[in-house]
Amino acid sequence: MNFRLLLFSLSIFLVSCVNTERNKNLKIFKYNEVSEVNTLDPAFSKDQASVWVCNQMYNGLVQLDSNLRVIPSIAKGWEILDSGLTYKFLLRNDVYFHNHEVFLNKEQRRVKASDFEYSFNRLIDERVASPGSWVLNNVDSFYAVNDSVFFIKLIKPFPAFLQMLSMQYCSVVSKKNFNKENKDFIGTGPFKFQFWKRGVKLVLRKNIDYFEKDDRNQSLPYLDAISISFIRDKQTAFLRFLQGEIDFISGIDASYKDEVLTRDGKLQDSYKGKIKLSTSYYLNTEYLGFYMNDSIPLKVRKAINLGFDRKKMIKYLRNNIGTPALNGFVPPGMPSFSNKVKGYEYNPELAKELLEKSDFDNEITLSTTSSYLDLCEYIQNELSKIGLKIKIDVNPPSTHRQMVATSKLSFFRGSWIADYPEAENYLSLFYSKYHSPNGPNYTHFVNKEFDSMYEKSFTVLNDSSRYLLFQKMDQLIIDSAVIVPLYYDYIVRLINPQINGFENNPMNLIHLKRTKK
């Protein structure tokens, strides 16, 4: 018995060694997620960690390229009819759900227009309670004509509707999977679900039936697998990255920022050749907002905008990771962005003059979180030089968000990350009918001219004409000093030199189907 047990143990050991050796030859992209992945269900993918994973596992009708242009995905083409009210999609016939035991054969796995009908009905089903149901708020109806034709009819025209359909919420899922209590997360994407132990590891494997190909007609993806770890400590994750156990780091933590980057945001000489540094525009604007129902005069709001040096702030506090916000609220990287929208250059003399003319001598409380305390203290110190007294109030992030949303703060730090790549998504923060808590207008700004232009933008289907409207609206916000734009954020990635084809895009999505290792 002992001899047999020894042989059995030896065979298990040998099989393990063979599997380990096989895995060494696999092209596995490894990254760490500091935050927990809360779901693999695209209808609930509201945070970045979940969006990144769902983006590998699922597809929608359309997708965005690296320049944020809408391009085909499962829909190989579309028509926009009835002055922007009706969308007709023609679907590919070679897209299949991941191979799984719930399907009896390959034909059952083929994606049909009825699968989108089911997926959209599920998205708006109150029993499902998806946080992404709002994406279809302006949809009157949707239906499959046959296996390859899918119609969507809107209540009113919305030029950014295709961009919204690129969101992971609108991914197609199978009724054979998602009507079960125990879901196995079957999608159509370049990678399929393999293993998940919460807080430890998540593994996705290559989908050998994936429909997209590269320019040489080679099947995608190139990678064999994706392995995601969940190390909470950012310094530990960085050390693992330096040891080659992780292939990329998103963002740079303050604990090692100065070690890796120069003051000008370049890679330190000691890391050249060991790390690839990738930076690009990020559709995220950091700002300070005023609650317009409180009595901070226009001259004082403008003095605050003029009273500190944004270029100096970004260089010394952010190692030039970001662009000083010297234009409007809409950031670079957005297709409609224009340098013609003029913001506030540093001008302490004019700031003093405005402050003196205002006869304002009150102390202003600036509310923030600890993550942005250094920026707020810098602004506090600079504004004290022009005679303005600023008190800083620090709250936990959840408390801060709640107080902003319920209009409890007169002067607050905020940020806005695009849900979809259209300036309307930013400018909606100043539409009078969207006053918080019923919408994102946290400043409670009211302006009839702005509202009129905002409403008109939905009827203008020509991009260049609509962009001009957006720029006029943005300039009006700046001239009214509703906010203090601080900086336009950057996407920063530290990448293993062995990785190629890992592209940035202003939405900060991860696309790994064309990545090579």
Image: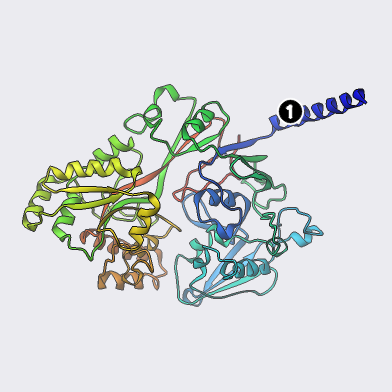
Q: Residue at x 65, y 64 (%)?
A: 91
Q: Is residue 360 left or right of residue 168?
A: left
The kind of secondary structure element at disc 1 is helix
Q: Residue at x 78, y 29 (%)?
A: 18
Q: Decide if residue 87 is in sight here.
A: yes
Name the residue tied to disc 1.
21
Q: Nearer the viewer, residue 386 or 77?
A: 386
Q: What x and y, as percent, mark residue 333?
A: 39, 50
Q: What x and y, as percent, mark residue 194?
A: 69, 45
Q: Is residue 510 left or right of residue 150?
A: left
Q: What x and y, as percent, mark residue 216?
A: 64, 44
Q: Nearer the viewer, residue 211 or 114?
A: 114
Compared to residue 443, the image places residue 229 above or below, namely: above
Task: Indicate the amino acid at tag 1.
Answer: Glu
Q: Residue at x 48, y 77 (%)?
A: 155
Q: Nearer the viewer, residue 451 or 62?
A: 451
